[in-house]
Amino acid sequence: MVDQSLKYSLSNHKVIEIMYMKDLKITQRRIQVLKMDNEIIKALDIGKGQLRTFKIDNILSAIDTKLIDSSEGTRGGGIIMLTERQMEILKAIHQYMQANSISPTVRNIRDLVGVKSSSTVHGHLTALEHEGYITKVEGSPRSIAVTKKGISALEEYKK
């Protein structure tokens, strides 16, 4: 899904907004994609006015800025485009809860989706929570819950 937004920006010369994780820090940037291959994009960072290189795997989400501007931010109802990994994590959380009647731990999620690092899972969970797809209580290992928005995204994904 992120790839679609990146390709959209590249082919239509449009600005998109991304959430990007580097060194376990998440930043939000408005970019216009100038060049793209399977692993990286080269883009103009609108906020800094500089050419930047981004690893596609580190882009947590991407959205057309028109959706943000017209909906008072993504929490106001805009549609955020989840990465395949985030959708996989959301699906794993939901299925685990249905099968076990308890929320999975970060380690459970890591093992279910085949990620080697728990910190990678934490980054995706932070993005999912920020966008309203899940809720969680800091410091509580089994407090992750899929929200109505998350359920809707899963239903839409199945189509």
Image (cartoon, rainbow, N blue to C red):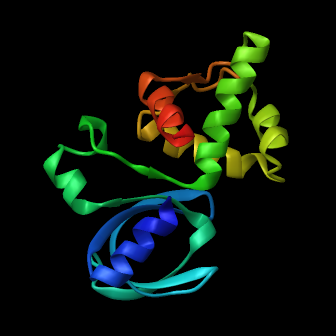
Q: Is residue 95 above or below residue 125?
A: above
Q: Is residue 105 above or below residue 128?
A: above
The percent coordinates of residue 32 (x first, y second) are: 33, 79
The reply to whether residue 103 is visible in this rendering is no
The percent coordinates of residue 54 (x first, y second) are: 52, 77
Q: Is residue 129 above or below residue 56?
A: above
Q: Residue at x 45, y 67 (%)?
A: 4
Count the marks.
0
Residue that sits furthest to the left in the current view: 70
Q: Is residue 16 above or below residue 159?
A: below
The percent coordinates of residue 124 (x first, y second) are: 60, 47
The reply to whether residue 150 is visible in this rendering is yes
The percent coordinates of residue 75 (x first, y second) are: 30, 37
Of 121 and 24, the residue lying toward us: 121
Q: Residue at x 41, y 63 (%)?
A: 18
Of 155 and 72, the residue lying toward us: 155
Q: Is residue 33 left or right of residue 70?
A: right
Q: Residue at x 70, y 16 (%)?
A: 98
